[in-house]
Amino acid sequence: MESETLSLIFGSILLIIGIYGTIIGWRYYIFLNSPADKFALRVMIAFIFFGILGGFTVIRSAFFEGVWWPFIALFTILGFLILALSSLHYLRLLYEEFGSKVNERKEKRYIPVGGFIVEDFEGVKTLLRYLFSKSNSLFVVSRRPQDEWEEEFGVKPTKYLWLSRVEEKQSVSPSNLHVILEEAVKFMRIRRNSVIYIEGIEYLILYNDFKSVAKFLFTLRDYAIVEKSLLLIFVSPDVLERSHYSILKREFETLEPEKFLEELMGTTLFGAVTKENFERITSEKPLNEKEDREEHASSESSET
């Protein structure tokens, strides 16, 4: 009799938890975007196996004779597998989205802080290849489609926004400056010491007044300073009005990529950099995540 009472109590608790978890999981499944909605659905299914079916089986064992433990074990195993596999899958997605501590350590060594104007188009391509090879954390806003930009620059950004009124997955309307700002700030907060690169300022001015674009850039520069990140803005004096260009020049220093890289590598490597080394380093292929982890592991083993 005592075992039947315990089965009834424990089964009821499991059933209540299962129903509550299923309802909450369903609510999150409705409101969350992909891939979080899929994770919520799997959690809901796990609660169904763990709580509802498991609790119902425990309660049933209190009133009916028979061997019910295989069913209890089956529902428990199924619920645990669904929850465990879903959690591991979501952790992988979080790693891909937010990066790793390895990248954060490398970013702190090589990424300067602040906002700069770049006028040398070929130079900025070299600069971005070098910075990305060290940080693996690059946010790009451009007028060109992503595949065209990647082919031109030889770099695959961590996150890319295409300035376009066409509704695509990675596109953003040039009139939605607040959306661009929110995405860039979120990126910098998640990946401190990151690189933000913006081109197509003249396109933004077409859909916004210059005052709004200037405020947007100034605010983004301030966030870059707070989040220990680097903001690079490609600006051509030929396509902007002289007064507009002068305002930007007062707020942003002009950066010469080759000189900047020489100073940066000199500080990093604690010595002068020859022209041969400069050309070799800036033409290196950007590290992918696997190579980045292997390089970090080898450096740690050599230090020990």
Image (tube, rainbow, N blue to C red):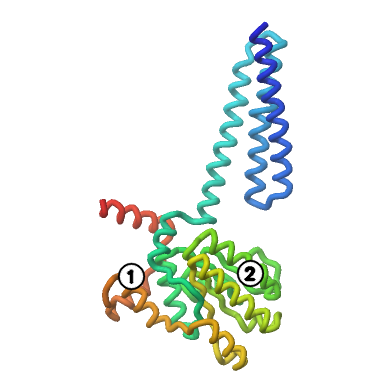
Report the disc number at residue 268: 1
Residue 139 location (% of width, % of height): 54, 68
Name the residue: 58% across, 41% down. Answer: 86
Residue at 65% x, 79% y is 213
Q: Nearer the viewer, residue 29 or 217?
A: 217
80 relative to 23 in the view: left or right:
left
Residue where numbered disc 2 is placed: 180
Q: Tell me the amino acid under the disc marked 1.
A: Thr
Tell me the element at label 1: helix
Q: Residue 8, position in %: x, y?
A: 69, 16
Tag 2 secondary structure: helix
Taking the image as drawn, is residue 144 in sight?
Answer: no
Query: For mark 2, does the 10 Å Cα neighbourhood hold few (<14), some (14 to 19), or many (20 or more) residues?
Result: some
Do the residues bearing badges 1 and 2 touch, measured as CB atoms within 8 Å?
Answer: no
Quarter holding residue 1: top right
Q: Amino acid at mark 2?
A: Ile
Q: Earlier in the sequence, mark 1 or mark 2?
A: 2
In the image, residue 127 lies at what x, y percent? 43, 76
Corner quadrant of residue 279: bottom left
